[in-house]
Amino acid sequence: MSSDHFYLFTALATFSSSVQEKLRQVQSPEEIVGVAAENGYQITASQLSFFSKRLNGDHWVWSRKGDEWRESFFAAAERSTLQAA
């Protein structure tokens, strides 16, 4: 998996109002991965979690909700992944 996809998707998210609107509506990291895939980018929830502190534009669902909220957003997805395995 290329990190180029991740960086290109975050750049798209910075400039595309339609992508920004979708990102504001997501309920899980997997939905963000889906938005990326819809636009031709393969990213992972792990990448999002790792870089989420640096992704602070208003279009990211965790924007202005604080570190605890952001951490629990990703923790819930990690728990679901572990349970499915």
Image: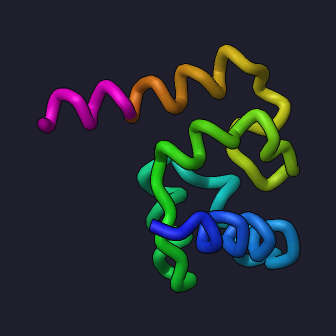
For the C terminus, the image quarter is top left
Outermost residue to the left: 85
Based on the displayed image, in which of its 4 quarters is residue 79 positioned? top left
Outermost residue to the bottom: 40
Magenta segment boundaries in residue numbering? 78-85
- The residue drawn where x is 71% and y is 74% is 8
When the figure is inspected, residue 60 is found, relative to residue 53, above or below; the finding is below
In the rendered structure, the answer to whether residue 76 lies left or right of residue 79 reads right
Residue 71 shown in magenta: no
Q: How many marks?
A: 0
In the rendered structure, the answer to whether residue 30 lies left or right of residue 73 reads left
* x, y percent for residue 15: 87, 75
In-front residue for pair 14/2: 2
In the rendered structure, the answer to whether residue 48 lies left or right of residue 1 reads right
When the figure is inspected, residue 66 is found, relative to residue 44, above or below; the finding is above
- The residue drawn where x is 47% and y is 48% is 45
- The residue drawn where x is 60% and y is 64% is 3
Outermost residue to the front: 2
When the figure is inspected, residue 42 is found, relative to residue 69, above or below; the finding is below
In-front residue for pair 51/67: 51
For the N terminus, the image quarter is bottom left
Is residue 36 visible in the rendered structure shown here? Answer: yes
- The residue drawn where x is 79% and y is 55% is 59
* x, y percent for residue 2: 53, 69
Q: Give the image's coloring scheme.
A: rainbow
Is residue 21 visible in the rendered structure shown here? Answer: no
In the rendered structure, the answer to whether residue 44 lies left or right of residue 3 reads left
Residue 82 shown in magenta: yes
Q: Most prominent secondary structure in the magenta stretch?
A: helix
* x, y percent for residue 65: 77, 26
